[in-house]
């Protein structure tokens, strides 16, 4: 199987989420805070997270474009990365007073990516 569906879906997801965090940081920041006024430092940190998401998406896609065999060899690494990323949502969900449901959604999406990588490993 030379055509990995994860090489398309995962980068698109992280680049889109990163773009939202980068260009519209008020949206994700509003989900995790109870304040109406946004702090410029908190918004800057949200933008930094957006840049990291874009970098993750670009790196995953670039590895696939350069070498499909390297992409296949890094399957376990991608599974570990997605498991780590999926652990952030529950931690924040239970630590934040507002408990935004979006954190649960992103956790479920990352777990779906883990299953996708496991499926591709068996191919």
Image (cartoon, grey):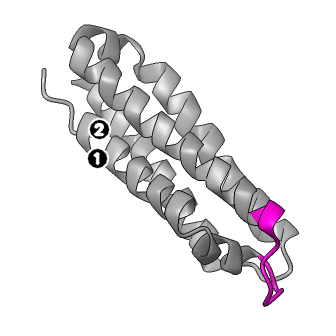
Q: Which residue is mark 1?
A: 9
Q: Position of residue 27 (x, y in %)?
A: 59, 76
Say left or right for 96 vs 83.
right
Disc 2, disc 1: CB below 8 Å? yes
12 falls in the magenta region: no
Say left or right for 6 vs 74.
left
At mark 2, the secondary structure is helix
At mark 1, the secondary structure is helix
Q: What is the residue that sits farthest to the bottom in this orientation?
A: 36
Q: Residue at x 28, y 30 (%)?
A: 120
Displayed quadrant of residue 98 = bottom right
Establish if 62 lies above or below 111: above
Q: Residue at x 49, y 35 (%)?
A: 55
**Nearer-the-camera pick, 33 or 111:** 33
* Number of marks present in the image shown: 2
**Nearer-the-camera pick, 103 or 28:** 28
Q: Position of residue 79 (x, y in %)?
A: 49, 31
Q: What is the residue that sits farthest to the front in this orientation?
A: 40
Q: Which stretch is magenta?
A: 33-42
Q: Which residue is mark 2?
A: 6
Crowd band around label 2 with a 10 angstrom C-alpha radius: few (<14), some (14–19), many (20+): some
Q: Position of residue 94 (x, y in %)?
A: 82, 69
Establish if 107 lies above or below 52: below
- Quadrant occupied by the C terminus: top left
Q: Residue at x 42, y 16 (%)?
A: 74
Establish if 70 lies above or below 53: above
**Nearer-the-camera pick, 118 or 93:** 93
Crowd band around label 1 with a 10 angstrom C-alpha radius: few (<14), some (14–19), many (20+): some
């Amino acid at each position: 199987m030379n055509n990995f569906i994860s090489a398309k879906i995962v980068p698109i997801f992280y680049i889109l989420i990163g773009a939202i965090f980068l260009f519209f940081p008020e949206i994700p920041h509003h989900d995790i805070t109870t304040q109406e006024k946004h702090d410029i430092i908190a918004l800057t940190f949200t933008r930094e997270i957006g840049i990291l998401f874009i970098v993750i998406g670009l790196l995953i896609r670039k590895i696939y474009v350069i070498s499909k065999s390297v992409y296949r060899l890094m399957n376990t690494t991608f599974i570990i990365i997605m498991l780590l990323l999926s652990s952030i949502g529950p931690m924040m969900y239970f630590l934040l007073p507002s408990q935004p449901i979006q954190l649960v959604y992103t956790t479920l999406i990352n777990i779906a990516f883990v299953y996708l990588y496991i499926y591709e490993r068996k191919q």
